[in-house]
Amino acid sequence: MTFVIDIAILVLLVGTLTYAWVVDRRVRSLMRVLREMEPMIGNFSEAVDRSESTVSVLRSLGQQAEPKPRPQREREREPEMTRAEPSFRTTRERPTRPTGATKASGKSELVRGFFETVRQREA
């Protein structure tokens, strides 16, 4: 009876070691792919930061700009609008954040921090 239990333990141990070997190979390939993608992710993060700053600059310029007054003749030619509310919205509704979610500031630092943490764990 003890011989059967020993054989069962050995079979389970070999299965566990095989599974650990497969997982290790997959993690190594994932880390290799992440290292290859690091420059592309960094460039994408910088592009997102630039676009966010550009949008905020454009938004502030749009708020500062005053509408140019139209001549009286143009206003007389246009028919009067009888609707009280516009047919479209000038701004989008802000999406609601899920409970417990926080806003990530400094996305570039977040991306760099991720890759630095990965490098430290590998060493």
Image (cartoon, grey):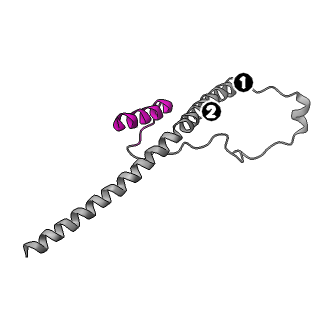
Residue drawn 36% across the image and 55% down it: 23
- Residue nearest the observer in this picture, 74 or 100: 100
Question: Where on the picture, by quarter, is residue 110?
Answer: top left
Figure check: 9 above or below 113: below
Q: Residue 102 colored magenta?
A: yes
Q: How many labels were placed on the picture? A: 2
Tell me where residue 5 appears, x and y as whole percent.
12, 71
- Residue nearest the observer in this picture, 58 or 104: 104
* Label 2 crowd (10 A; few <14 / some 14-19 / many >=20): few
Residue occupied by mark 1: 65
Figure check: 17 above or below 59: below
Residue drawn 46% across the image and 44% down it: 32
Left or right of 67? Residue 21 is left
Q: Considering the image in quadrants, where does the C terminus appear?
A: top left
Left or right of 61? Residue 113 is left
User: Which type of secondary structure does the marked residue at label 2 adopt?
Assistant: helix
* Label 1 crowd (10 A; few <14 / some 14-19 / many >=20): few
Q: What residue type is labelled 2?
A: Ser
